[in-house]
Image (tube, helix red, strand yellow):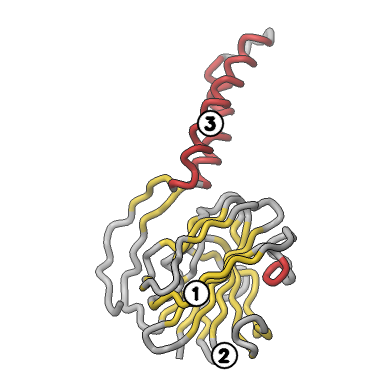
Amino acid sequence: MGKRIKKLKNVRLHREGTNTLLYSGMAIVVIAILLWHCFDTKIPFWIFVAVFGFFYGVVVNFYRCPIRYFGGDTENIVVAPADGRIVVIEEVEEETYFHDKRLMISIFMSPFNVHANWYPVDGRVKFVHHQDGNYHKAWLPKASEENEHSDVMIETDNGIDVLCRQIAGAIARRIVTYAKPDEDCYIDEHLGFIKLGSRVDVFLPLGSEVSVKMGQSTTGDQTVIAKLK
Protein backbone atom coordinates (compact mmCIF):
# COMPACT_ATOMS: atom_id res chain seq x y z
CA MET A 1 0.00 0.00 0.00
CA GLY A 2 1.29 3.57 -0.01
CA LYS A 3 3.21 4.80 -3.04
CA ARG A 4 3.45 2.73 -6.20
CA ILE A 5 6.00 2.73 -8.98
CA LYS A 6 4.25 3.27 -12.30
CA LYS A 7 5.14 0.49 -14.73
CA LEU A 8 4.57 -0.02 -18.42
CA LYS A 9 1.09 -1.24 -19.33
CA ASN A 10 0.57 -4.35 -21.39
CA VAL A 11 -2.42 -6.33 -22.56
CA ARG A 12 -3.20 -10.02 -22.64
CA LEU A 13 -6.36 -12.05 -23.16
CA HIS A 14 -8.38 -12.97 -20.11
CA ARG A 15 -8.49 -16.65 -19.16
CA GLU A 16 -12.29 -16.44 -18.94
CA GLY A 17 -12.40 -16.16 -22.71
CA THR A 18 -10.12 -19.06 -23.67
CA ASN A 19 -12.86 -21.51 -24.72
CA THR A 20 -15.08 -18.82 -26.22
CA LEU A 21 -12.29 -17.45 -28.41
CA LEU A 22 -11.19 -20.91 -29.50
CA TYR A 23 -14.63 -22.21 -30.48
CA SER A 24 -15.89 -18.96 -31.97
CA GLY A 25 -12.73 -18.69 -34.08
CA MET A 26 -13.24 -22.19 -35.42
CA ALA A 27 -16.92 -21.50 -36.14
CA ILE A 28 -16.14 -18.28 -38.00
CA VAL A 29 -13.62 -20.04 -40.25
CA VAL A 30 -16.05 -22.88 -41.04
CA ILE A 31 -18.94 -20.51 -41.78
CA ALA A 32 -16.79 -18.33 -44.04
CA ILE A 33 -15.61 -21.36 -46.04
CA LEU A 34 -19.15 -22.77 -46.35
CA LEU A 35 -20.55 -19.45 -47.56
CA TRP A 36 -17.75 -19.13 -50.08
CA HIS A 37 -18.27 -22.61 -51.53
CA CYS A 38 -22.06 -22.91 -51.28
CA PHE A 39 -23.05 -19.61 -52.89
CA ASP A 40 -22.35 -18.54 -56.44
CA THR A 41 -20.58 -15.26 -55.80
CA LYS A 42 -17.85 -13.20 -57.35
CA ILE A 43 -16.98 -11.57 -54.04
CA PRO A 44 -13.29 -12.17 -53.30
CA PHE A 45 -12.64 -14.61 -50.46
CA TRP A 46 -10.59 -12.03 -48.56
CA ILE A 47 -13.77 -9.95 -48.09
CA PHE A 48 -15.39 -12.88 -46.29
CA VAL A 49 -12.28 -13.15 -44.15
CA ALA A 50 -12.33 -9.41 -43.38
CA VAL A 51 -16.03 -9.34 -42.44
CA PHE A 52 -15.91 -12.38 -40.18
CA GLY A 53 -12.54 -11.27 -38.85
CA PHE A 54 -14.15 -8.02 -37.73
CA PHE A 55 -16.75 -9.87 -35.65
CA TYR A 56 -14.05 -12.05 -34.16
CA GLY A 57 -12.11 -8.92 -33.32
CA VAL A 58 -15.10 -7.63 -31.33
CA VAL A 59 -15.06 -10.83 -29.27
CA VAL A 60 -11.29 -10.57 -28.75
CA ASN A 61 -11.68 -6.94 -27.65
CA PHE A 62 -14.25 -8.00 -25.06
CA TYR A 63 -11.81 -10.47 -23.49
CA ARG A 64 -8.83 -8.13 -23.37
CA CYS A 65 -7.16 -8.20 -19.98
CA PRO A 66 -4.98 -5.09 -19.53
CA ILE A 67 -2.24 -5.25 -16.91
CA ARG A 68 -2.39 -1.83 -15.31
CA TYR A 69 -0.55 -0.10 -12.47
CA PHE A 70 -1.82 2.94 -10.62
CA GLY A 71 1.00 5.47 -10.42
CA GLY A 72 0.68 7.31 -7.12
CA ASP A 73 -0.16 7.15 -3.45
CA THR A 74 -3.20 4.87 -2.94
CA GLU A 75 -4.02 5.91 0.62
CA ASN A 76 -7.68 7.01 0.79
CA ILE A 77 -7.91 6.77 -3.00
CA VAL A 78 -10.84 4.99 -4.70
CA VAL A 79 -10.23 4.00 -8.31
CA ALA A 80 -12.73 2.87 -10.93
CA PRO A 81 -13.18 -0.91 -10.65
CA ALA A 82 -14.10 -1.14 -14.34
CA ASP A 83 -13.89 0.44 -17.78
CA GLY A 84 -17.15 2.13 -18.78
CA ARG A 85 -19.05 5.30 -17.96
CA ILE A 86 -20.53 6.79 -14.80
CA VAL A 87 -24.32 6.28 -14.67
CA VAL A 88 -25.07 6.94 -10.98
CA ILE A 89 -23.68 9.32 -8.35
CA GLU A 90 -26.12 9.60 -5.48
CA GLU A 91 -26.82 9.02 -1.80
CA VAL A 92 -28.77 5.82 -1.22
CA GLU A 93 -30.15 3.87 1.74
CA GLU A 94 -28.06 0.70 1.92
CA GLU A 95 -30.12 -1.69 4.04
CA THR A 96 -28.34 -4.99 3.44
CA TYR A 97 -25.04 -4.37 5.26
CA PHE A 98 -24.65 -0.77 6.44
CA HIS A 99 -28.26 0.09 7.35
CA ASP A 100 -27.62 3.75 6.70
CA LYS A 101 -27.00 6.17 3.86
CA ARG A 102 -24.05 5.62 1.55
CA LEU A 103 -22.62 7.37 -1.50
CA MET A 104 -23.08 5.10 -4.50
CA ILE A 105 -21.05 5.50 -7.68
CA SER A 106 -21.99 3.17 -10.54
CA ILE A 107 -20.14 2.30 -13.73
CA PHE A 108 -21.94 0.78 -16.72
CA MET A 109 -19.90 -1.47 -19.04
CA SER A 110 -21.06 -1.87 -22.63
CA PRO A 111 -20.23 -5.05 -24.60
CA PHE A 112 -17.35 -3.10 -26.17
CA ASN A 113 -15.60 -2.38 -22.86
CA VAL A 114 -12.97 -4.53 -21.17
CA HIS A 115 -14.90 -6.58 -18.61
CA ALA A 116 -12.17 -7.37 -16.12
CA ASN A 117 -12.84 -5.78 -12.71
CA TRP A 118 -10.27 -4.31 -10.32
CA TYR A 119 -10.29 -3.69 -6.57
CA PRO A 120 -11.30 -0.06 -5.98
CA VAL A 121 -9.22 0.32 -2.80
CA ASP A 122 -6.33 -1.26 -0.93
CA GLY A 123 -7.35 -3.25 2.14
CA ARG A 124 -8.61 -6.62 3.35
CA VAL A 125 -11.58 -8.58 2.04
CA LYS A 126 -14.09 -9.01 4.89
CA PHE A 127 -16.56 -11.18 3.00
CA VAL A 128 -17.88 -12.15 -0.43
CA HIS A 129 -21.59 -12.78 -0.99
CA HIS A 130 -23.34 -13.89 -4.19
CA GLN A 131 -27.04 -13.15 -4.61
CA ASP A 132 -29.22 -14.68 -7.32
CA GLY A 133 -31.75 -12.36 -8.93
CA ASN A 134 -33.25 -10.87 -12.07
CA TYR A 135 -31.62 -9.58 -15.24
CA HIS A 136 -32.93 -6.05 -15.67
CA LYS A 137 -31.01 -3.69 -17.93
CA ALA A 138 -27.86 -2.87 -15.99
CA TRP A 139 -28.24 0.92 -16.10
CA LEU A 140 -31.66 0.89 -14.40
CA PRO A 141 -31.69 1.93 -10.69
CA LYS A 142 -33.43 -1.28 -9.57
CA ALA A 143 -30.65 -3.39 -11.12
CA SER A 144 -28.37 -2.73 -8.15
CA GLU A 145 -30.66 -4.56 -5.71
CA GLU A 146 -32.82 -6.84 -7.85
CA ASN A 147 -30.36 -8.23 -10.40
CA GLU A 148 -28.03 -11.15 -9.76
CA HIS A 149 -24.95 -9.68 -8.11
CA SER A 150 -21.82 -10.44 -6.15
CA ASP A 151 -20.84 -8.26 -3.17
CA VAL A 152 -17.26 -7.80 -1.97
CA MET A 153 -16.79 -5.90 1.30
CA ILE A 154 -13.33 -4.40 1.74
CA GLU A 155 -11.92 -2.82 4.90
CA THR A 156 -9.18 -0.26 4.22
CA ASP A 157 -6.11 0.22 6.44
CA ASN A 158 -7.93 3.13 8.08
CA GLY A 159 -10.87 0.92 9.04
CA ILE A 160 -13.27 2.23 6.38
CA ASP A 161 -15.64 -0.31 4.81
CA VAL A 162 -16.10 -0.08 1.05
CA LEU A 163 -18.62 -2.28 -0.76
CA CYS A 164 -17.98 -3.24 -4.39
CA ARG A 165 -20.94 -4.88 -6.18
CA GLN A 166 -20.66 -6.74 -9.50
CA ILE A 167 -24.04 -6.77 -11.23
CA ALA A 168 -25.31 -8.93 -14.07
CA GLY A 169 -27.28 -7.14 -16.81
CA ALA A 170 -29.92 -8.04 -19.37
CA ILE A 171 -27.33 -9.90 -21.46
CA ALA A 172 -24.72 -10.87 -18.89
CA ARG A 173 -25.30 -14.29 -17.34
CA ARG A 174 -22.06 -15.00 -15.53
CA ILE A 175 -20.29 -13.13 -12.76
CA VAL A 176 -16.84 -14.37 -11.77
CA THR A 177 -15.41 -13.15 -8.44
CA TYR A 178 -11.81 -13.88 -7.48
CA ALA A 179 -11.92 -12.12 -4.10
CA LYS A 180 -11.63 -14.41 -1.07
CA PRO A 181 -12.53 -13.57 2.56
CA ASP A 182 -9.64 -12.51 4.82
CA GLU A 183 -7.26 -11.96 1.91
CA ASP A 184 -5.32 -8.72 1.51
CA CYS A 185 -6.30 -6.89 -1.67
CA TYR A 186 -4.70 -4.09 -3.60
CA ILE A 187 -5.48 -1.62 -6.33
CA ASP A 188 -3.92 -3.09 -9.53
CA GLU A 189 -5.28 -6.58 -8.75
CA HIS A 190 -8.26 -8.14 -10.50
CA LEU A 191 -11.36 -8.56 -8.35
CA GLY A 192 -13.25 -10.54 -10.98
CA PHE A 193 -14.84 -10.59 -14.43
CA ILE A 194 -18.37 -10.14 -15.80
CA LYS A 195 -19.35 -11.49 -19.21
CA LEU A 196 -21.15 -9.09 -21.59
CA GLY A 197 -22.87 -5.81 -20.71
CA SER A 198 -23.05 -5.21 -16.98
CA ARG A 199 -22.36 -2.79 -14.13
CA VAL A 200 -20.26 -2.29 -11.00
CA ASP A 201 -21.41 -0.24 -7.97
CA VAL A 202 -19.14 1.16 -5.28
CA PHE A 203 -20.66 2.17 -1.91
CA LEU A 204 -18.66 4.75 0.06
CA PRO A 205 -19.16 6.64 3.34
CA LEU A 206 -21.00 9.95 3.11
CA GLY A 207 -18.55 12.81 2.92
CA SER A 208 -16.26 11.05 0.47
CA GLU A 209 -14.97 13.50 -2.14
CA VAL A 210 -16.35 12.61 -5.57
CA SER A 211 -13.79 12.98 -8.37
CA VAL A 212 -15.97 12.13 -11.39
CA LYS A 213 -19.19 13.36 -12.98
CA MET A 214 -22.20 11.77 -14.65
CA GLY A 215 -21.52 10.35 -18.09
CA GLN A 216 -17.76 10.45 -17.66
CA SER A 217 -15.75 7.60 -19.15
CA THR A 218 -13.66 5.59 -16.73
CA THR A 219 -10.61 3.37 -17.06
CA GLY A 220 -10.41 0.56 -14.54
CA ASP A 221 -7.56 0.91 -12.02
CA GLN A 222 -6.63 4.32 -13.48
CA THR A 223 -9.50 6.78 -13.03
CA VAL A 224 -9.82 8.15 -9.48
CA ILE A 225 -13.56 8.21 -8.75
CA ALA A 226 -13.42 9.42 -5.12
CA LYS A 227 -11.23 10.21 -2.13
CA LEU A 228 -12.08 8.89 1.34
CA LYS A 229 -12.00 11.13 4.39
The amino acid at mark 2 is Leu
In this rendered view, identify the residue nearer to me: 121 or 215: 121
Which residue is located at x 33 percent, y 64 percent? 69
Query: Where residue 3 sits in the image (x, y, percent)?
Result: 27, 77
Quarter of the image for residue 105 reads bottom right
Label 1 CA crowd tier, 10 Å (few <14, some 14–19, many 20+): some
Which residue is located at x 44 percent, y 48 percent? 14
Quadrant of the rendering where the C terminus is positioned: bottom left
Residue hosting label 3 = 23
Residue hosting label 2 = 206
- In the rendered view, would you say 9 is above or below 163? above
Which residue is located at x 28 percent, y 57 percent? 8
Disc count in the image? 3
Label 2 CA crowd tier, 10 Å (few <14, some 14–19, many 20+): some
The amino acid at mark 3 is Tyr
Side (left or right) of 207 relative to 137: left
Residue hosting label 1 = 127
Query: Where residue 65 sits in the image (x, y, percent)?
Result: 43, 51
Side (left or right) of 206 relative to 78: right
Query: Where residue 140 sits in the image (x, y, percent)?
Result: 73, 67
In this rendered view, identify the residue nearer to me: 168 or 224: 168
Quadrant of the rendering where the N terminus is positioned: bottom left
Q: Which of the marked residues, 3 or 1, is nearer the chain's N terminus? A: 3
The amino acid at mark 1 is Phe
Q: Are the residues at dot 3 and dot 1 in contact (C-beta closer than 8 Å)?
A: no
| Marks 3, 1: nearer the viewer | 1
